[in-house]
Amino acid sequence: MTRTPQFTAHNGFALPAVGLGTYRLNGEAGAAAVAAGIDLGYRLVDTAFNYENEGAVGAGVRTASTERADIIVTTKLPGRHHAAERARTSIEESRYRLGGDAVDLHLIHWPNPSRDLYGEAWQALVDAQTRGLVRQIGVSNFLPEHLERIEAETGARPVVNQIEVHPYFPQTDALELHAERGILTVAWSPLGRGKELLEEPVIGEIAGAHEITPAQVVLAWHVARGTVSIPKASSAEHQRANLQAAEVVLEPAEVEAITALGRPDGRLFGADPAIHEEM
């Protein structure tokens, strides 16, 4: 079994460097893919209320032969549930769908700052942790000002900020800020624009040098930068390859060459957390 490196947050909470993304892994097939991934060696499984597959993920976790205590399941609170009472109910519903006595890691999916309710949502997660409904709490797509505000208001610092990170959008400043505060960076869409990115000559050259695939190069780049990646994979072949990428050690110059692919307009769909809303 692959020995996946781990990264540790300010409170000692640790995540493996590569997890299993589950967006669009739904129903019976989705549950089977999750179970298979866990039994291949994944110990982090990422879902969200808005993916509409918490039930499938929970079923996959229960079906897997791996001990439940060894698995970390992440889910996320949607924007339409930020208000205090709705947040409380949403957190409870996610726990019921996933099964078990508590959600391992619960995040706010997007800050939606124009609605200005993410502070209430964060307090609801703090309260849920106190009540024992969730073990760890974090955020997703939060900018520095959002992180500062929720900690100032509650005294509670997130263990995770899940943000868009890939070679076209390397987010170097955000990674440095998170590292200073002991907040783990989890990268969504870690392979960026898929085919376009994977056909970049520099990535192809590095893949050839290490005798691995271009996708494995990108995932190894995330590991080298201390970032947790959660690529979606439904086939055993891709699941295994993604896990194996965590063991690849790139040279510092290779990491720098990949980071240099960053673009000013590198976001996948222009989802700037300062203005983007996702309900």
Image: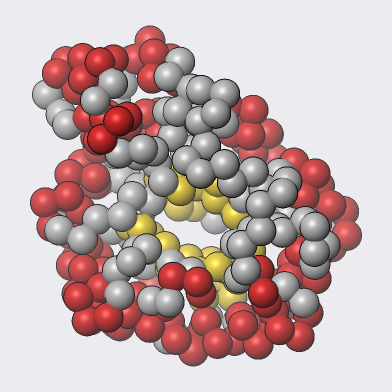
By what rule are the colours in the image chosen? Answer: secondary structure
Residue 118 drawn at (x, y percent) = 76, 64
Residue 231 in view (yes/no): yes
Instruction: Please give the name of the residue rendered at 24% of the width and 46% of the height, measured from the top-left corner.
Output: 243
Q: Is residue 20 left or right of residue 36?
A: right
Horizontal side, residue 26 vs residue 118: left or right: left
Residue 13 picture quarter: bottom right
User: Residue shown at 21%/61% (left/top)?
Assistant: 234
Pinpoint residue 195: horizontal percent, then vertical percent: 26, 35
**129 on left or right of 199:** right
- Where is residue 71? Give x, y as percent: 37, 67
On the image, the x and y values in percent for residue 136 come to 59, 65
Q: Residue at x 28, y 58 (%)?
A: 42
Q: Is residue 242 above or below residue 123?
A: above
Q: Quadrant of residue 73?
A: bottom left
Nearer the observer, 63 or 276: 276
Residue 12 visible within the image: no
159 is higher (above) or lower (below) than 201: below
Identify which residue is drawn at 47% across, 40% down: 268
Location of residue 175 with respect to 140 vertically, above or below: above
